[in-house]
Amino acid sequence: MISNAIAAVDSENRRKEPLAPFNVGDSVRVYVKVREGDKERVQVYSGTVIARKGGGATETFTVRRISHGVGVERVFPVHSPNVVRLEVEGSARVRRAKLYYLRQRVGKRVRLREKTGSD
């Protein structure tokens, strides 16, 4: 009985139209709705997906980029109505589920190996 109630709430809070399929290591552009006072606009945040966490309606993903020499990470809920859309710019070949090791890297060492047809 309780699991049925949880499943109902979970399905109710999920996104109606799914985001573009993406994985850890992909370069993405996330379009986010931002409210400033009574105005609303869409802001683009681009970077590399370094983690996906959770499942169901509470699933999140972390996007990292370097802004003015400083590493900036943002966590987005997959099923949030504030995430308007997501575009995958490129995919990289990674062998980890979480790319937290990129936090210690700077410059060219942050780059990931691009995925080719044989990967």
Image: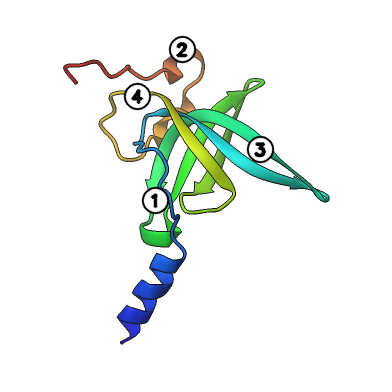
Give the residue number, with chain letter if any, for mark 2: 108
Label 4 close to label 1 by CB (< 8 Å): no
Q: Residues within 10 Å of mark 1 (few under 14, many from 20)?
A: some
Q: Position of residue 105 (x, y in %)?
A: 47, 23
Q: Name the front one of labels 1 and 3.
A: 3
Q: What crowding class fits label 2: few (fewer than 14 Cα within 10 Å), some (14-19), or many (20 or more)?
A: few
Where residue 71 appears, x then y in whole percent? 58, 29
Residue most toward the front? 17
| Numbered marks: total | 4
Q: In the rendered structure, which disc, 2 or 4, sits on the residue that comes first in sequence? A: 4
Foreground disc of the pair 1, 2: 1
Q: Are marks 1 and 3 in contact (CB under 8 Å)?
A: no
Task: Work out whether mark 1 precedes mark 3 in sequence or the reverse, and give the earlier one.
Answer: 3
Residue under circle 3? 42
Q: Residue at x 40, y 68 (%)?
A: 10
On residue 91, the disc is: 4
Camera-nearest residue between 8 and 58: 8
Q: What crowding class fits label 4: few (fewer than 14 Cα within 10 Å), some (14-19), or many (20 or more)?
A: many
Q: Nearer the viewer, residue 6 or 105?
A: 6
User: In the rendered structure, which amino acid carries the disc numbered 2?
Assistant: Lys
Q: CA distance from mark 1 to mark 3?
A: 24 Å
Q: Which residue is mark 1?
A: 53
Looking at marks 4 and 3 on the same chain, the residue that comes earlier in the sequence is marked by 3
